[in-house]
Amino acid sequence: MTASGTFGYGEEFEEYLPLEKLGAIVVKGISFNPRSGNPPPRIVETACGMLNAIGLENVGVERFIKEKMPYLQKVGNKTIVNILGDSIEEYCAIVERLNDVSGICAIELNISCPNVKKGGVAFGTKASMAAEVTRSVKNVCNFPIIVKLSPNVTDICEMACAVQEAGADAVSLINTLIGMAIDIEKKRPVLANTIGGLSGPAIKPVALRMVWQVSQAVTIPVIGIGGISTWQDAIEFILAGATAIQVGTANFVNPNAAEKIRVGINQYLQDNGIESIADLIGAAHPGR
């Protein structure tokens, strides 16, 4: 899958790779009303990753349905809609608007973006609030629900167990780590938002560790995200316990990255005589 926020609404990448061969496209986060995001500068390159403070800029649910979904329906790929809100009511209102839209296979709840001043990460850092928004959305949603978890918590397993108990069908992790950069000439933070979300290869060891831990704490599928740039990275996440993976920042480095990873995984399976990738899930854990 492609990770939300790094692959637009799919059509931006159509000239680079066969979209229909991807496992799924997770579209840019959708709010009820359009958002203009944070003021620039919003992106900073780091030594082995990227800081972003886009601020969840998006077209809003009505324009998404009218202008973006027709293309995704034509491609025929599985579409997962990442949604965000400032309140539980907003999350539910978005889902109720999407319930009758064809071509959607799941909803991913973004409760973990660190770049907005309200909502977002507030739901993702308290287990009780994460459970409450999950339960509320589950009650009105016609699709399976994936809850995207923040790494910026004391115990990510507690968060995963809370949303599982509240009805989540799967969890995806991790979202970005909170970071910042300072312009030493101006003596000011580089990002207009001061802080941003760190993604890319730098966070892969953290993400891998959390997938390893969460996959042992819950019984629902775990989707691994965080610094996956190669098929070897993807295999590591599967061995750690991920049922599937999402590719994020690598799309900016190589717009064909998701396809190369898909092909590499298949070749690895063939080379090692493995009939199903399911045989690899969690295989690095003791006793497997």
Image: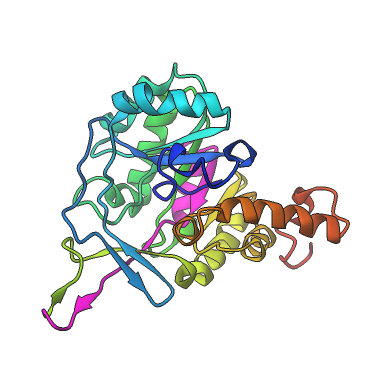
Q: Nearer the viewer, residue 44 or 162?
A: 44
Residue in the picture at 64% in, 56% down? 261
Residue 182 sits inside the magenta stretch: yes
Q: Where is residue 190 shown, x and y percent of the image?
A: 19, 70
Determine if residue 91 is in view.
Answer: yes
| Furthest-right residue in this view | 273
Q: Nearer the viewer, residue 45 or 223?
A: 45
Magenta stretch, residue numbers:
158-186
Q: Is residue 203 above or below residue 222?
A: below
Residue in the picture at 35% in, 46% down? 111
Residue in the picture at 69% in, 61% down? 239
Q: Is residue 191 left or right of residue 214?
A: left
Image quarter hosting the C terminus: bottom right
Q: Nearer the viewer, residue 156 or 199?
A: 199
Q: Where is residue 96 shown, x and y percent of the image?
A: 36, 21
Residue in the picture at 38% in, 44% down? 110
Q: Where is residue 151 shown, x and y percent of the image?
A: 41, 61
Q: Is residue 188 left or right of residue 179?
A: left
